């Protein structure tokens, strides 16, 4: 897609600014971000300062990469020698050796790596060959900030992922019945998302009933649905490589006053954050607005995580909306707003929306009702 | 579970052998391996030389960890400050600072890290505090080899995962009809696995029809099933944290002679490898046996990946069965045997079994027919 060209150009200009001769990207999601090549584990993107982009893939991924990635040179590297295989662009070397060769032949003096997303062993093996002759530059912030600002094609993919996720959710909650297990509900939702065109879920679907909902990262298990159950569902679809991420907490067959009060407070916290959000505000400021809303009701001590995070190729990306985050919001960022109240041994309530930061404020991308009884 | 105690003891004795004062494990799957704590992203296991094990988790995972992990001290660390939260074991520090404190207070002189599974940034931030005063020791091989040898509880979990995967597969293939898409078949299979008790899939289910099956890592998409289709399915269930991994390639509504010849050769390659496998043989030797079988039929140049890999908490683990692998097979290892023949623009055929290395040879854990027409 052509929007990737613009992203490459931004990376190139950062290389020039920081005086970086070569960038090597080893994490699958950033490789996908720049190339569109999906499920890129083991694949590495090499960016030369003259503007040449090369995707190095393990031999077994060569044809898939070659057929799906255009405008980028694809090379196969040898995780192990396969002498009989006939591939034109087969370097027949291990990845480290292939990178070392480039550094030598192009007399690279400074190499840009994403420190937080690179493996220690990979960096160590490169650096031990060159010691002080090669300068290491962290491009983690550059990559994170580039990925944070979504162009229209990316917003479209995320919006489509949200649409799939919401339609699938609406379908399955109308079919909830006494006696169904968390795992079965999760399985139904995942299946609906695939039927609606999702290529995958964004993360293992969380379905948590009652006391299991007190864990923000609850795992779906064998608990059974019954009248009066609290049902927390946190789920997302993946479309064209981009994620959605939404949470709803429902009452099934009647709800307590305590539940009603808490979900009202949680929804008010969302509204207060959405009203506040605009370009230039910091992550900790948005978090504080929602946290203050919960504090009015004595609930802030039960809010045991940050308010939200960026979403894109990964379900958790820059920026963070949390206490201590000085990340500054900018137009084009897509973030979650997800206050939660977790009362141990009782239940948890979390509602999660996704918003796009606009020039003047934000646009809510999610559209399901925030509070539902079924 | 008590089997984890034995694993800890093995780690402790390696620490003594290598003179390591402190081990810090930062990757989610090894944390799960030692503690049973699932979905452990962001959690870190600290092993002190006096035998104290501590699991550091982000605040939001504290109660889930505390409720599910026994015999291990659980501490919450601060990815961001949450001053109102009342948790007894809350260190109220970032992870790096918490680790630095331990190193200082226990006068740690050597720290064991898994180089291949640790992030560069994490290691860098620890080491810049101590420079040459702290010796770094790679425990990657120790961890990989420990994880490779499965005890009976682990073999049982893997066997249960295989049973779930196989029953689910049998159910869905009897329902395949003209016009169904790859994604829908993948969704059906995932749903069946959850209904049968899987906590998740082991990896995104591959369903590939016809020309899409030539990619070993094909992605399920919108292709439609029709008479004469080749159908490659590579799938696995997760049970109690352990993975299965199986592949079958079917002909739907009739198959060509070419397909029949290839699948026979692939199955013969599996038999030849299984007959050969026993403790003491190397990964490259097993690979060569299967590759030679395919070579007899002129098919080895289409076999573009290694023959197999270990399976456990991760779907790809030590050892590797591939050209160039000197990994030595030992009783208790569980590995895949998965020869494949990929003929560009036509179709690919892969059949994948899982075997347990025994004292005298191996036991095949998978039980589905290897070749099927539907």
Image (cartoon, coloured by chain):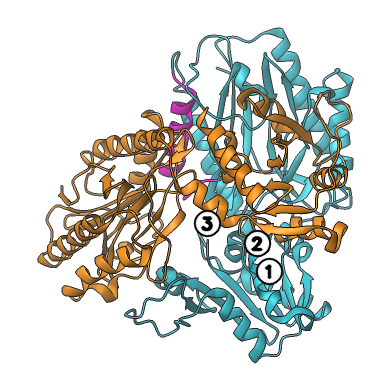
Chain colours: A cyan, B orange
Q: Based on the displayed image, in which of its 4 quarters is residue B198 positioned?
A: top left
* Distance (Cα) linking label 1 and label 3: 31 Å
The chain carrying label 3 is: A
Query: Judging from the image, what secondary structure is the residue with disc 1 in?
Result: helix
In this view, the mark in front (1 or 3): 1
Q: Is residue B67 above or below residue A30?
A: above
Local secondary structure at mark 2? loop
Viewer can see residue B363: yes
Instruction: Report crowding for label 3: few under 14, some 14 to 19, many 20 or more residues within 10 A (C-alpha).
Output: some
Report crowding for label 1: few under 14, some 14 to 19, many 20 or more residues within 10 A (C-alpha). some
Q: Position of residue A67 (x, y in %)?
A: 42, 72
Residue position for label 2:
A119
B245 over A175 or under it: above or below: below
> Where does the magenta region start and end?
A180-201
Same subunit, tags 2 and 1: yes
Chain for mark 1?
Answer: A
The front one of B232 and B2 is B2
**CA–CA distance in space, label 2 to label 1:** 7 Å
Residue pointed to by mark 3: A240
The first of marks 2 and 3 along the sequence is: 2
Point out the tag, 1 or 3, that comes first from the N-terminus.
Answer: 1
Query: Quick check: marks 2 and 1 in contact, CB under 8 Å?
Result: yes
Q: Quadrant of residue B277?
A: bottom left
Query: Are callouts 1 and 3 both on one chain?
Result: yes
Q: Secondary structure at mark 3?
A: loop
Q: Along the horizontal axis of the image, is A302 left or right of B346?
A: right
Q: Which residue is label 1 attached to?
A: A123
Percent x, y for residue A9? 70, 76
Most foreground residue, B21 or B316? B21
């Amino acid at each position: 897609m052509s929007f990737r060209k613009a992203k490459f150009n931004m990376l190139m200009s950062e290389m020039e600014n920081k005086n970086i001769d070569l960038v090597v990207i080893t994490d699958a999601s950033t490789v996908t971000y720049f190339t569109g090549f999906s499920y890129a584990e083991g694949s590495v993107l090499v960016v030369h300062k003259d503007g040449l982009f090369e995707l190095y893939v393990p031999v077994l991924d060569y044809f898939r990469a070659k057929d799906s990635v255009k405008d980028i040179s694809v090379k196969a590297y040898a995780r192990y020698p396969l002498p009989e295989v006939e591939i034109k662009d087969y370097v027949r070397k291990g990845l480290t050796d292939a990178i070392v060769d480039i550094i030598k032949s192009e007399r690279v003096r400074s190499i840009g790596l994403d420190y937080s997303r690179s493996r220690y062993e990979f960096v160590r093996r490169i650096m031990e060959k060159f010691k002080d002759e090669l300068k290491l530059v962290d491009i983690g912030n550059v990559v994170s900030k580039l990925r944070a600002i979504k162009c229209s094609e990316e917003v479209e993919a995320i919006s489509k992922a949200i649409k799939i996720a919401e339609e699938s959710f609406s379908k399955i909650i109308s079919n909830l019945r006494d006696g169904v297990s968390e795992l079965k509900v999760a399985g139904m939702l995942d299946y609906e998302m695939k039927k609606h065109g999702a290529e995958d879920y964004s993360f293992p679907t969380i379905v948590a009933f009652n006391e299991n909902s007190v864990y923000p990262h609850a795992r779906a298990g064998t608990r059974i649905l019954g009248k009066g159950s609290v049902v927390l569902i946190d789920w997302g679809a993946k479309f064209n490589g981009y994620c959605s991420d939404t949470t709803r907490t429902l009452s099934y067959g009647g709800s307590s006053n305590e539940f009603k009060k808490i979900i009202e407070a949680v929804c008010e916290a969302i509204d207060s954050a959405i009203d506040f959000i605009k370009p230039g505000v910091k992550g900790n400021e948005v978090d504080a607005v929602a946290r203050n809303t919960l504090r009015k009701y004595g609930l802030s001590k039960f809010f045991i995580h940050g308010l939200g995070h960026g979403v894109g190729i990964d379900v958790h990306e820059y920026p963070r909306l949390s206490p201590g985050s000085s990340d500054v919001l900018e137009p084009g960022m897509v973030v979650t707003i997800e206050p939660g109240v977790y009362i141990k041994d009782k239940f948890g309530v979390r509602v999660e929306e996704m918003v796009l930061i606009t020039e003047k404020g934000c646009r809510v991308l999610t559209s399901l009702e925030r509070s539902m009884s079924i």
